[in-house]
Image (cartoon, coloured by chain):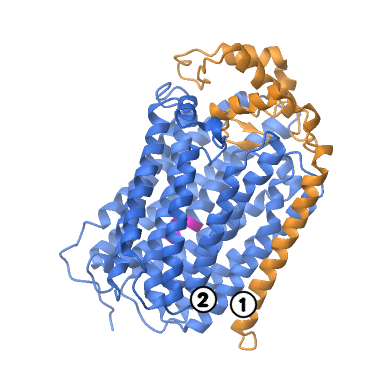
Chain colours: A blue, B orange
């Protein structure tokens, strides 16, 4: 590690992993509630568990992105971070705001939380993924601005690489599109239309820039491939991501009261959304094949390659599965959507954050380049346990979704939602089983940080 | 990637393509917002409907249900619940939820809504059911 200010990334990564654990525990609770309906009722109703599950995911990924930026940008810009103090301060602000919000979800009824936080002054709550009290949303904006200032100033005073520029564009986009979270008109169709400007333009837009940048950084570092080559790939990938993804927003505008033409725009452009993900897979494997050096951190390379593959499967393939409007007419808002959501988030964003953590953490903890062999073996076991169980979670949810769509929407005598839910119970039990394996994988992951600490660093066999 | 395709070409495609399609999205958004009154049922957006939307939001209904297919997949679609149950049916259902739930089954929490809040949320769901959603959902079951 060349710059001491890179150290501020460490608490961000630790917080990310801590919140990740919380996210998975609540996922397990919800999976249980799918089969044992009164599990933890009325103490933790499903809607509360889901809010905690999805909000923790978003917050820990944001912690991961910020930690990644604080680690990467000084290295790329070849200068110390503009203000390590501001970064540390914002860490605590974000952590405390996040923790208070989650406690609020768990300890008081949501309507009361809305009341306490004076939601009526500027109502923004109660919309999927944007459940945070308005005051928390304002906090997020402040943290984001301070963060962008810090990163921006660092880039300005130092070397400007394509990787840090793309990261910066992605992060600015993240902050700008989040502002639509404050727009909540009474007109439901308008509300839904612009809600997607946060949700879709994040995960199928600007977050892909962040993803590309992080992946490119890890690949440059671990393969030693020429920067020119990597940067060219990065540009093409993110170009395709935005060219397809911006108008691809239309695949959310089929059935929410928006004009019919969106079925054409949405279907055609979102059908091309797998292209950047496929290119990302080609990119990652090509760079590793053309590597000019063997990096001792095998685990980081595994996460990077795994990310590229799983992002293509989860976001690309499972997205395409139900993106064409004639198909989506039947699958919209079913377990098919849930299946896609799980593998896409895990493959694209969870894995890229774990890749950068895997690469950076050994150095942040005083190693030269990599953890000991035994620690890496544990980490790679956790990779396979989590990744394979996520594949099965996705497959079981897809199975449930297909049966649901047929019985509830396509068959001769459409049956009611709850009747159909009972009929697909088996799939939900299997999903819960796969979820428990995921939890085991996560425990192994956490343990990998503690095993083999006194062992020597892994070395490259020559 | 081939040598003839240079990094600056890739960069230009990124900047040019992004700006072009961002503008296209802006144009389509402008047109959508302009033509929305034909399909969004805004002529029936009364003060009571607006209030109902706040009741809907303040109780995080989207955390279990879908509304026009968006939300959580734990409980039934409510975009067309007005057509399934009628206004009185919707109100009666919300009111009658047992505080302690139903043993072994999913059950909606008891939200202790006032009569006015119940009326408002039912009006909101009626308004939602009249939005022209291109004939979605495929049938009454949602």
Q: Which residues are magenta?
A: A348-353
x, y (%) of residue A179? Answer: 57, 49
Residue at 71% in and 15% down: B87
Quadrant for the N terminus of chain A in the image: bottom left
Q: Which residue is mark 1?
A: B11
- State left or right for residue A94 relative to residue A319: left
The answer to whether residue A174 is visible is: yes
Residue at 51% in and 16% down: B110
Residue A351 belongs to the span the image colors magenta = yes
x, y (%) of residue B126? Answer: 73, 23
Residue A159 image-quadrant placement: bottom left
x, y (%) of residue A115? Answer: 48, 26
In the rendered structure, the residue with mark 2 lies on which chain?
A
Q: Which residue is mark 2?
A: A162
Q: Residues within 10 Å of mark 2 (few under 14, many from 20)?
A: many
- Determine the residue located farthest toward the front in the rendered image: A121
- State left or right for residue A176 relative to residue A451: right
Who is closer to the viewer here, B118 or A306? B118
Tag 1–tag 2 contact (CB < 8 Å)? yes
Work out whether A375 lies above or below A263: below
């Amino acid at each position: 590690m060349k710059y001491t200010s890179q150290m501020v990334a460490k608490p961000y990564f630790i917080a990310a992993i801590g919140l990740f654990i919380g996210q998975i525990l609540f996922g397990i609770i919800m999976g249980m509630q799918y089969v044992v309906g009164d599990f933890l009722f009325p103490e933790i109703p499903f809607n509360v568990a889901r809010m905690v599950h999805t909000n923790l995911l978003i917050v820990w990924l944001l912690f991961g992105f910020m930690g990644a930026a604080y680690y990467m940008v000084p290295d790329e810009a070849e200068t110390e971070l503009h203000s390590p103090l501001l970064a540390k301060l914002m860490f605590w602000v974000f952590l405390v705001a996040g923790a208070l919000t989650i406690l609020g979800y768990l300890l008081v009824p949501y309507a009361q939380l809305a009341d306490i936080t004076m939601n009526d002054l500027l109502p923004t709550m109660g919309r999927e993924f944007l459940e945070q009290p308005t005051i928390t949303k304002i906090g997020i904006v402040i943290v984001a601005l301070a963060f962008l200032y810090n990163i921006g100033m660092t880039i300005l005073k130092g070397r400007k690489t394509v990787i840090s520029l793309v990261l910066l564009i992605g992060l600015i986009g993240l902050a700008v599109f989040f502002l639509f979270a404050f727009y909540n008109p009474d007109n439901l169709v308008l509300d839904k239309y612009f809600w997607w400007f946060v949700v879709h333009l994040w995960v199928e837009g600007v977050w892909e820039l962040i993803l590309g940048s992080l992946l490119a950084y890890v690949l440059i570092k671990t393969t030693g491939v020429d920067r020119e080559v990597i940067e060219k790939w990065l540009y093409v990938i993110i170009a395709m991501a935005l060219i397809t993804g911006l108008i691809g927003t239309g695949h959310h505008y089929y059935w929410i009261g928006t004009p019919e033409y969106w079925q054409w725009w949405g279907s055609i452009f979102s059908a091309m959304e797998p292209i950047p993900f496929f290119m990302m897979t080609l990119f990652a494997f090509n760079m590793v094949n053309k590597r000019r050096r063997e990096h001792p951190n095998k685990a980081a390379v595994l996460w990077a390659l795994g990310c590229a593959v799983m992002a293509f499967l989860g976001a690309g393939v499972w997205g395409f599965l139900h993106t064409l409007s004639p198909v989506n007419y039947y699958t919209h808002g079913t377990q098919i959507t849930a299946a896609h959501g799980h593998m896409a988030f895990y493959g694209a964003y969870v894995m890229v954050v774990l890749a950068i953590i895997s690469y950076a953490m050994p150095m942040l903890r005083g190693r030269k380049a990599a953890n000991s062999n035994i620690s890496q073996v544990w980490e790679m076991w956790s990779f396979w346990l989590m990744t394979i169980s996520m594949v099965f979670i996705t497959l079981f949810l897809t199975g449930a979704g297909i049966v649901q769509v047929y019985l509830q929407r396509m068959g001769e005598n459409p049956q009611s939602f709850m009747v159909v839910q009972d009929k697909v119970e088996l799939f939900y039990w299997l999903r819960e089983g796969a979820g428990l394996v995921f939890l085991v994988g996560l425990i192994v992951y956490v343990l990998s940080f503690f095993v083999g600490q006194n062992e020597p660093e892994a070395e490259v066999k020559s | 990637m081939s040598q003839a395709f240079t990094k600056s070409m890739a960069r230009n495609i990124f900047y040019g393509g992004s700006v072009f399609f961002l503008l296209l999205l802006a144009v389509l958004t402008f047109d959508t917002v302009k033509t929305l009154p034909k399909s969004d049922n805004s002529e029936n957006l009364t003060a009571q409907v607006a209030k109902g939307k706040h009741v809907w939001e303040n109780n995080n209904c989207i955390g279990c249900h879908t509304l026009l297919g968006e939300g959580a997949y734990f409980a039934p679609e409510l975009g067309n619940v007005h057509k399934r149950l009628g206004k009185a049916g919707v109100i009666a259902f919300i009111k009658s939820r047992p505080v302690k739930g139903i043993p072994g089954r999913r059950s909606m929490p008891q939200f202790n809504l006032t009569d006015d809040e119940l009326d408002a949320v039912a009006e909101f769901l009626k308004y939602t059911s009249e939005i022209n959603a291109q004939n979605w959902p495929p049938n009454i079951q949602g």
